[in-house]
C-alpha cells in the first residue's frame, strides 16, 4: 500500500495501468520517462525534486482519491490536473525558483473552486498578482 522510491528512473512499459493497491506514494529525485499512474486508490502523493512529472497526467482523472498532494522543487506543474482534485484536503507546492514567465498566472478562484474540501493550502515560490476589479 506504500511506495517510497529515491534516485531512480521510472519508465513504465506500454499499457501499464498503474498499481491497484497503493495508498501512499513518496518519491525523491525520481525521473519519469513515460506516461504513468499510481492508481486510483492513492490518497497521499509526495514528489520531491522529481523530473518529467508531465507524464503523471493519467494520475489526475475524475476517479482519483487524492486527499494530500505535495510538490517540492519538482518540474513545472500542469495546473489542469487540479480540475479533478475534488477530494483534496492538503495541497503544498514549494518551488525553489520563481517561474521565469510572467504569463503563468495562477487563478486561485478557479484552483480553489476545484477543491471544495481543501483545508490546508501552502504555495511557496510563486509570484502573486491581484487583479484590479475597477
Image (cartoon, helix red, strand yellow):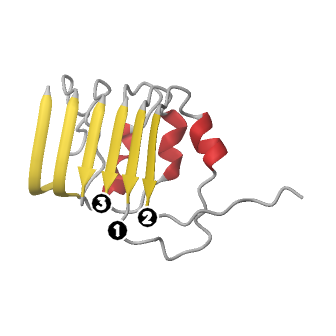
Rendered-image quadrant of the C terminus: bottom right
Residue 11 visible to the viewer: no
Q: CB under 8 Å between callouts 2 and 3?
A: no
Residue 90 visible to the viewer: yes
Query: In this orientation, which residue lies closer to the viewer: 110 or 20?
Result: 110
Please report the residue visible at 50 percent of the width from the left and 26 percent of the height from the top. 117
Residue 125's disc is 2
How far, Cα to Cα, is label 1 from label 3?
17 Å
Tag in front: 2 or 3: 2
Q: CB under 8 Å between callouts 2 and 1?
A: yes
Residue 52's disc is 3
The relative height of residue 21 versus residue 51 in the rendered view (above or below) is above
Please report the residue visible at 29 percent of the width from the left and 24 percent of the height from the top. 41
**Residue that badge 1 annotates:** 96
Instruction: Please tell me how crowded label 2 is: few (under 14), some (14-19), or many (20+) other residues with Cα within 10 Å.
Output: few
The relative height of residue 44 versus residue 92 in the rendered view (above or below) is above
Provide the secondary structure element on which disc 3 rests.
Answer: loop
Q: Position of residue 71 (x, y in %)?
A: 33, 51
Mark 2 vs 1, N-terminal side: 1
Q: Position of residue 75 (x, y in %)?
A: 34, 62
Amino acid at each position: 500500500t506504500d511506495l517510497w522510491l529515491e534516485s531512480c528512473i521510472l519508465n513504465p512499459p506500454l499499457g501499464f495501468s498503474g498499481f491497484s493497491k497503493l495508498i501512499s506514494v513518496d518519491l525523491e529525485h525520481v525521473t519519469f520517462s513515460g506516461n504513468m499512474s499510481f492508481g486510483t486508490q492513492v490518497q497521499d502523493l509526495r514528489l520531491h525534486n522529481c523530473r518529467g512529472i508531465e507524464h503523471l497526467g493519467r494520475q489526475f482523472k475524475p476517479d482519483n482519491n487524492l486527499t494530500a498532494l505535495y510538490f517540492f522543487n519538482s518540474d513545472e506543474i500542469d495546473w489542469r490536473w487540479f480540475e479533478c482534485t475534488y477530494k483534496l484536503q492538503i495541497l503544498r507546492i514549494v518551488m525553489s525558483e520563481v517561474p521565469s514567465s510572467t504569463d503563468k498566472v495562477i487563478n486561485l478562484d478557479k484552483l480553489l473552486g476545484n477543491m471544495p474540501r481543501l483545508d490546508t493550502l501552502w504555495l511557496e515560490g510563486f509570484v502573486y498578482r491581484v487583479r484590479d476589479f475597477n
